[in-house]
Image: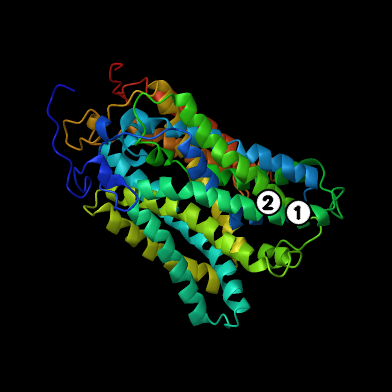
Amino acid sequence: MASTLPEPHPAARESLAPESSERAAHVESHGIDHIPEGERHGHPRQLFSVWAAANVNYLSLVLGGALVLMGLTLGQAIGVIVVGNLFWLLTGVLAVSGPASGTPSEVVTRALYGVRGNRVNNAVVGWMISVCYFALNLAAAATAGFALVERVGITATTGVQITVVVVIAVLTLVISVYGHAMIMKLYLPITLALTAVFAVVAVPVFQHTDFSYVPAERLTGTELWAVLIAGVTLIAAGPLSYTTSADFSRYLPRETPARAVVGWTALGAFLPSVAVCSLGALAATTLDMSDPQTALQSILPGWFAPVFLLALVLGTIAINALTAYSAGLALQAVGIKIRRSFSVLVDGAAAVGLTLYALLVSNFLDTVSNVLQLTVVLLGPSMAIYATDILMRRNRYDGLALTDESRDSPFWYVAGVNWAGAAALAGGVTASALSVNTVYTGPLATALGGIDLALPVGILVSAALYALLMRTPLGAPHIPSAA
């Protein structure tokens, strides 16, 4: 742009330190500000290990086992796992906006909702839901941590449980506070370590699997379709929760091929997620996977059980470090003038509180199922609008213009809100909510005999509305000329 833009607030740009300060031994200096081309580095293949480490985890085992517990045959469960994980392609598509803009997703979405409208978006989609996922994953890691302390002879009293939760949260937040460079450095060895552990686990699981398994009462007709679609929604909730994938690709050079960013991101998440979820489903054919940790320990060699428990904790730390990192950026993007490193700590404190509630008050499996399925009502439309905007703009984003929060910003739209984006999100969420059949049954689900189409309906309606409304006076997209 020809005009001079105001300098980012210090809370957003913690310093203008050279690239050397971004090494893993230093706390990341950048927040939600634009990354100058001179500080861009790396190769898209690094994204593979980032997403792989985050998807070799306990929650994936829980979800894979849950599909069999829902009444599906083994073949049906594996099919659902593959289809649900295909949504990682959308996560990869969103990641291409990082190198294009040099800004995180929390800033790119100003193009979708306007400067002010995006603050609301980040408060709900970026921060609140991220903290909920942080809490759910932390609860999963904590159950493994409880078993680990029991093995060394310590009774997992309430006080011990609280201590375990806090220790795991602290380890997670250390990675998030140090930031991007630390994540890039640690996640390849974490991926290798977790892959080795789960490869060992796979051996006894395969030995105990009943490959001809069918439930005592097979689902048929409408009931079968309802469970199949609910299963896909449950699995898809994982990739749909990462509307922030540009956070981890924004340091890549602007000329990085978009196809490589999509491919390495999607493949890095898809392969381990399918493998670990399938492991959970295979185990559920002969084991009680309502408590996966205990069930799997019963078939593992005694010496290996502590290693397995440590791996469950490590995998969850990996996924939660990404979640906390993005939640910290979201808190900045809401408009709170706070350093990224401190915002991450705020996120951690909130997540610890929610985790203790999930573990000490609520039923963990019910909490996981309800939260994951209901967040799809919001996350499906949110991701669809983001992906549609990338396609409409041909992934051309002016990173410096996106950091301008003044009334002169090309993304101010009307009163700071892009009403096309807001209307598309509201329409998609409404349509999705009417189609839900989880903790409540919407009228459209009732009319379809209980089939929950919240995911496809929300995605299609929001994407179509956004593409249409952005071509009306409601939306005035700012598409910079090609570099």
Q: Residue at x 79, y 47 (%)?
A: 74
Colouring chosen for the image of the structure: rainbow
Answer with the quarter of the image where residue 113 lies.
top left
SS class of the residue under badge 2? helix
Q: How far apart are marks 2 and 1 (CA)?
A: 7 Å
Q: Which of 314 and 447 is in front in this view?
A: 314
Side of 40 relative to 436 (left or right): left
Residue at label 1? 203
Answer with the quarter of the image where residue 339 lies.
bottom left
Q: Which residue is drawn at 20% across and 50% down?
A: 11
Image quarter where the C terminus lies is top left
Q: Which residue is drawn at 40% across and 65% down?
A: 170
- Numbered label attached to residue 199: 2
Seen in the picture, residue 161 relative to 449 is either above or below; the reply is below
Seen in the picture, residue 343 relative to 356 is either above or below; the reply is above
Seen in the picture, residue 143 relative to 35 is either above or below; the reply is below
Residue 346 is at least partly visible in this image: yes
- Numbered label attached to residue 118: none
Residue 439 is at least partly visible in this image: no
Crowding at label 1, few (<14), some or many (≥20) Cα neighbours within 10 Å?
A: few
Label 1 is placed on what type of residue? Val
SS class of the residue under badge 1? helix
Query: Quick check: marks 2 and 1 in contact, CB under 8 Å?
Result: yes
| Residue 312, percent from left and from top | 58, 60
Q: Which residue lies furthest to the top in this view?
A: 482
Crowding at label 2, few (<14), some or many (≥20) Cα neighbours within 10 Å?
A: few
| Residue 96, percent from left and from top | 42, 30
| Residue 354, percent from left and from top | 46, 65
Image quarter where the N terminus lies is top left
Q: Which of 138 and 38 is in front in this view?
A: 38
Label 2 is placed on what type of residue? Ala
| Residue 309, percent from left and from top | 61, 65
